[in-house]
Every structure is written in C-alpha cells, then in structure tokens.
Image (cartoon, grey):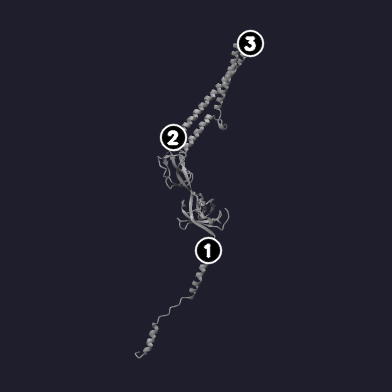
C-alpha cells in the first residue's frame, strides 16, 4: 500500500473536491413570465376600453332624510317630556305635554255657554209666543177702531158728529195699525233668533255658536299633548324642558324620518349627457367600508346649485370665468341597509349610463 502511485491519490482527491455545477432555471418559467405580463397589461387595457363611458360617478354625494319639525298648536307651560335626544320613536308616540288646566277650564266655560244659549232660546221662544198674542190683540184693536171710524164717517156725512170725534176715530185706526206692525216685527225677530243655524241643522243659531266654541275648546285641550307624526329619531330636543313656556307654532323638536332615505349626488354638468331617470346606480359610504347598496336615479334637479344659492353668480359683470356647474341628482336606495344610514353621511355614487330606460 505504501508503494501506491501518489499521483492517482491526488487526482482522485481533487476530483472529489470540485463543486457540483448549479442547475439552470427551467426555461418554461421564463417563457410564462414573458407571456403573462403582456397578457395582463392587455387584459387591463381591454377592461378599461370596454368600460370606458359606461359609468359616471361622483363622491360629492350625501345621505339625505326627511326632517319633520314638530311644534305645539297651543301655547302653555311644558309639564312633561317623554323623549330624549337620539331616541327612536314610532308614529303616534307621545313627545311632550303642555299644562292642560287652562284648556280644561275653557272647555267647561264652553259647556256652560251652551246651557246659557239653550235658556236664551227657550226665553225667545216664549217671547215669540207673546208676540203672537200681541199681534192678535193689535188686530182686534184695529177692527174696533175701524168700526168706530166707519160710524163716525157716516155720522159726519149726516152732520150728527163733530170733526174732533171723527179725527179721533181715524187716529185710533192708525195707532192700531202701528201696534200691529210693531208686534209683527217683534214676532219676526223672535222667530229669527229661535231659528236654526247654518245648513238647516235644526239647532238654534245661538246654541250652534256655543257648540262651535265647545268644539274648539275640546280640540285645544287635545292638542296639549304632542305626538310623533312619523317614525324616526328624535333630534334637537334641547328646547323640551319641563317648566319652559311653549309658544304656539314655534318648532320644539325635530324627527329624522327613518323610512325615507335617499342620496343627493352633485354631478358635473358634463356627466348628464347620457344620464336618465331610472338608470341603476351603486352607492358606497365613507363611514362603512365595503358596504355597497343598489339604487337608481330617481330624479334630476331642475337647476344647478349656483342657481339656488343665496347670491347667484352674475356673469354679466365682465369678470366671467367659466366654471363647471354641478346639478343635484336624487338617487333612491333600493336595498335594505344592514347599517344605519345617518343623514349627512358622505357617499359615492356610480351610475350605469348604458340603461336609458324610464322607471
């Protein structure tokens, strides 16, 4: 073994010490990469080319809800408050109550006025009967005075009476006719006062007037309690404080209606060329990431926002700069939202303008 060729050992050890060559990457990976990148670019370009002009969108949009201002129909002091800020209410729920005592007294006074009117009517009916008796008496006096006058006239022709007696008989006839006219007028007045009111109701006018006052007093008493006209959320309820005086007609609290929600989107005037009522739309919200609701274009505004501003632009001054105007478009929400839609939330609207159908 010691006599072995040392060159053979060195060759073998060098060959074993040489590093193995690294395998080259497969050719198909390079080919796939070279082919896929252009295909992706072409697909993206094709998508934008196919969808170009299909949608118009704006992020100048806000959630809108009907706001109902509730005021008191009668004035008075608040004695009870049944709601608080941001409390949900249903239509017909009690909001607040005004002191009913003055209106209850007014109702009692109206009932007393009805009783008084009935007594007056009965008195007038009695007077009407007395007037009829006066008419009969006046007619009898006229008949007697006429007979006396006729006798005096005959005697006057024969010369058996004086001119004074004849004139006295004529005066008695005239006086009787005057009393008859007075009795007839009194009877007509009594009949008119006892007569029925408007609409041939059969109720005397005085009683009908008192009943109208009673109805008003009863209505005022009922209006001391204010109820929610719609379902929604109570807001601006700071004016509802027990002990505070409420003025009739002054807004006391507001209710944001929960069943009527839409989005008011302000589109550029250049976007309205192909926009039509009824086109489908998609609504997304800044507050709720990932929430998208379906809707449709409900109406397009009759004027731009600048036209309805407090100080509209006057382009005839000579300092005219053309500015792209925005037109308010109402978008109705068709889907039920899983999250509460709060009035004033920022939204983004995307309208598919390919559909020109009317709803």
Q: What kind of element bears circle 1?
A: helix
Whether residue 274 can be seen here: no
Q: Secondary structure at mark 3?
A: helix
Residue at image location 57% in from the left, 23% down from the top: 185
Looking at the rendered image, the quarter that the N terminus falls into is: bottom left
Q: Which residue is mark 2?
A: 102
Q: Residue furthest right?
A: 158
155 horizontally vs 239: left or right:
right
Q: Which mark lies nearer to you, 2 or 1? A: 1
Residue under label 3, please give it: 156
Q: Position of residue 148 (x, y in %)?
A: 61, 13
Image-quadrant location for residue 7: bottom left
Q: Is residue 131 visible?
A: yes
Residue drawn 50% across the image and 33% down it: 213
* Residue at the extreme front: 318
Residue that label 1 marks? 48
Tell me: residue 272, above or below residue 240.
below
């Amino acid at each position: 073994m010691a006599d072995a060729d040392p060159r053979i050992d060195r060759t073998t050890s060098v060959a074993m010490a040489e590093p193995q060559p690294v395998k080259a990457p497969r050719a198909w990976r390079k080919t796939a990469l070279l082919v896929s990148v252009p295909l992706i670019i072409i697909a993206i370009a094709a998508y934008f080319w196919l969808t170009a002009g299909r949608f118009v969108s704006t992020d100048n949009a806000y959630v809108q809800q009907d706001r109902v201002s509730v005021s008191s129909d009668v004035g008075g002091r608040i004695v009870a408050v049944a709601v608080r800020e941001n409390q949900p209410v249903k239509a017909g729920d009690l909001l607040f109550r005004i002191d009913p005592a003055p209106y209850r007294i007014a109702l009692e006074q109206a009932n007393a006025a009805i009783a008084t009117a009935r007594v007056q009517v009965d008195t007038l009916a009695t007077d009407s009967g007395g007037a009829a008796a006066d008419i009969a008496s006046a007619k009898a006096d006229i008949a007697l005075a006429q007979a006396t006058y006729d006798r005096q006239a005959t005697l006057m022709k024969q010369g058996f009476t004086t001119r004074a007696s004849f004139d006295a008989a004529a005066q008695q006839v005239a006086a009787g006719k005057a009393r008859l006219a007075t009795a007839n007028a009194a009877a007509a007045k009594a009949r008119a006062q006892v007569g029925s009111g408007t609409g041939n109701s059969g109720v005397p006018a005085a009683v009908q007037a008192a009943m109208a006052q009673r109805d008003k007093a009863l209505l005022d008493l009922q209006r001391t309690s204010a109820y929610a006209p719609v379902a929604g959320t109570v807001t601006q309820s700071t004016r509802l404080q027990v002990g505070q005086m409420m003025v009739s007609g002054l807004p006391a609290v507001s209710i944001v209606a929960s069943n009527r929600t839409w989005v008011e989107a302000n589109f550029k005037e250049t976007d309205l060329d192909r926009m039509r009522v009824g086109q489908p739309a998609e609504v997304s919200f800044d507050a709720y990431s990932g929430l998208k609701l379906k809707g449709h274009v409900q109406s397009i505004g009759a004027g731009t926002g600048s036209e309805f501003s407090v100080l509209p632009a006057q382009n005839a001054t000579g300092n005219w700069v053309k500015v792209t105007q925005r037109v308010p478009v109402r978008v109705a929400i068709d889907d039920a939202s899983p999250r509460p839609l709060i009035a004033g939330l920022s939204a983004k609207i995307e309208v598919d303008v390919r559909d020109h159908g009317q709803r």
